[in-house]
Amino acid sequence: MTDAEVYSAYEPPEADWLRVNFVSSADGSATLDGLSGPLSGSEDKRVFKVLRARCDVLVAGSGTVLAEGYRELVLSPERVKWRLDHGLPEVPVMAVVSRSARLDPTDPIFTRAPQRPIVVCAADAPADRQEALGGVADLIAIGDGQVDFAAAVAALRERGLRQILCEGGPRVFGDLIAADLVDELDLTVSPLLVGAGPGRIAAGHGSPGARPLELRHVLEAGGNLILRYLRGSSDE
Ligand SMILES: NC(=O)c1ccc[n+]([C@@H]2O[C@H](COP(=O)([O-])OP(=O)(O)OC[C@H]3O[C@@H](n4cnc5c(N)ncnc54)[C@H](OP(=O)(O)O)[C@@H]3O)[C@@H](O)[C@H]2O)c1
């Protein structure tokens, strides 16, 4: 597929849209040696980068940001050009979810950010941490004891951040499923057996019931299945 075809394969159906992107091994593991990178290949990365280029805000949980060593967002000149041609700012806003605001304000994800990042935390996260992070990021402090994801997503949309891409991790995804906020799951199934041990792509709180999905496309590249699911309707 050309790059233009990949972009158009991920056209969001609505202006307000929340998509989640994950890679999993064929036997359902979300990590290998504690990271997602070893499960991923160049074709999965290509979709990953297109999804980043298409979003207004990139959301990731603290577990993911710390484990995967997220830094400031950098897009290639071609992706920046695509964004500018489509009326978007050069890079998306980065939003990090940490229930307890346990993030280091001197981390490059904040200090080198090309756009002022956002921290999403619980309203009762320690005040000193909220204050320290308030110097380097906008805070959305919402929910008692845990993040209220429905309210947090509404707060992002109020800021004009309507195309939301969540790159996980499993706890954040579990919470988004429980709150019924997921419009799309982009999932690469990589041709690997990891075996017992690591967790799945969703973790944490249980959901009230299974949510139906509609399969929009299946791409195959290098033995990887690249799946795009949209929110389905329960009466199908
Ligand atoms: N396969 C993939 O595509 C993929 C994608 C992303 C991540 N990953 C992997 O997933 C792992 C990280 O995932 P994760 O699920 O730990 O983190 P996560 O979903 O990125 O973030 C954790 C969130 O859950 C909160 N949390 C942590 N422990 C909690 C608890 N006991 N009760 C309630 N909330 C809690 C955190 O708050 P605090 O900050 O207060 O702890 C934070 O808000 C990494 O190994 C990463 O490599 C894989």
Image (cartoon, helix red, strand yellow):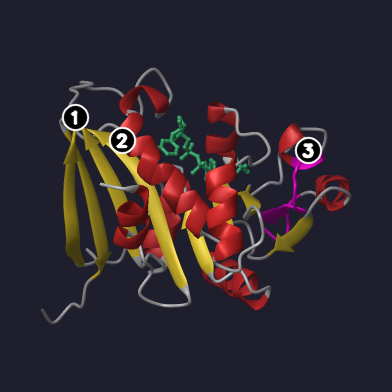
Asked if the residue at tag 1 contacts the one at tag 2, i.e. Cβ–Cβ closer than 8 Å, the answer is yes
- State the quadrant of the C terminus: bottom left
Q: Which residue is mark 2?
A: 43
**How far apart are the two marked residues, 2 and 1, measured between alpha carbons?**
8 Å
Q: Nearer the viewer, residue 208 or 158?
A: 158
Task: Residue at 64%, 51% (x, y): give it.
Answer: 94
Tag shown at residue 222: 1
**What amino acid is labelled 2 in the image?**
Glu
Q: Is residue 2 above or below residue 123?
A: above
Mark 2 secondary-structure assignment: helix
Task: Residue at 75%, 53% (x, y): give it.
Answer: 115
Instruction: Look at the image and give the residue range highlighted in magenta.
Output: 110-125
Q: Residues within 10 Å of mark 3 (few under 14, many from 20)?
A: some
Which is more foreground, mark 2 or mark 3? 2
| Residue sitting at the far top | 33
Query: Does 69 sit left or right of 214 as displayed?
Result: right
Does the beta carbon of the residue at mark 2 sit less than 8 Å from ligand 1?
no
Task: Residue at 77%, 53% (x, y): give it.
Answer: 116
Q: Is residue 131 above or below residue 68?
A: below
Q: Position of residue 134 (x, y in %)?
A: 85, 53
**What amino acid is labelled 3 in the image?**
Arg
**How far apart are the two marked residues, 2 and 3, measured between alpha carbons?**
28 Å
Q: Which residue is mark 3?
A: 112
